[in-house]
Every structure is written in structure tokens, then in C-alpha cells.
Image (cartoon, helix red, strand yellow):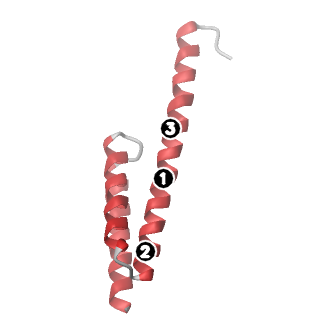
Amino acid sequence: MANIKSQIKRNKQNERRHERNKAVRSELKTRVKSAITAAEAGGEDSVEAVRQAISKLDKAAGKGIIHKNQASRRKSRLMARIAKLQAES
């Protein structure tokens, strides 16, 4: 445990940020998974689900929770997977 006051504060800040970032990363996975499931089902809500997933990825990249290249890669893979699903049906 740190003895220095500023380091104690820094540890608390890091812990709060870690929890917040973990929640956002979990939300990203959920949105991507729901977009894929909606596309597999072929419902009208699939477009909205994909839009939400892409929006969440962009916001996470903008806030520095994930790297911008990682967000771009995830969006690319999501769109490729959805295109493949639509081509099959």
C-alpha cells in the first residue's frame, strides 16, 4: 500500500477508471453479439443493432478505452460477418 498521499489518490482514481472501462468493454461485447444474433434472425431490428454496436465502438475508441485501430478492426469484422450472413440467406 502506498504511503504517499498523491499515490493513494492515484490508486483510487485508477480503480474507478478500471471498473468503468471494464463495464464499457463488456457493453461492447454485448452489443456486437446482439448485432450478430439479430442479423442471424434476419429481423428489422438488425440494422439498429449494428448501428448501436458501431456507435459504442466509436465512442469507446474516442474515450481511449480501446485503441482506434482495434475499434476499426472490430467494426470491419462485424460488417464482414453480417455481409456473409446476408449472402447465405
> Mark 1 sits on what residue?
27
Along the line of sight, the residue nearer the viewer: 20 or 44: 44
Q: Residue at x 36, y 54 (%)?
A: 57
Q: Is residue 11 visible?
A: yes
- Residue 60 lies, with reference to residue 84, above or below; the image says above
Quadrant containing the N terminus in the rendered view:
top right
Where residue 8 sits, quadrant-wise, is: top right
Which mark identifies residue 38? 2
The residue carrying pointer 1 sits among few (fewer than 14), some (14 to 19) or many (20 or more) residues within 10 Å by Cα, namely some
Give the percent coordinates (x, y) of residue 55.
31, 55
Give the foreground label among 3 and 2: 2
Q: Residue at x 46, y 67 (%)?
A: 34
Residue extending farthest bottom: 89
Q: CA distance from mark 3 to mark 2?
A: 27 Å
Q: CA distance from mark 1 to mark 2?
A: 16 Å
> Mark 3 sits on what residue?
20
Q: Amino acid at mark 2?
A: Ala
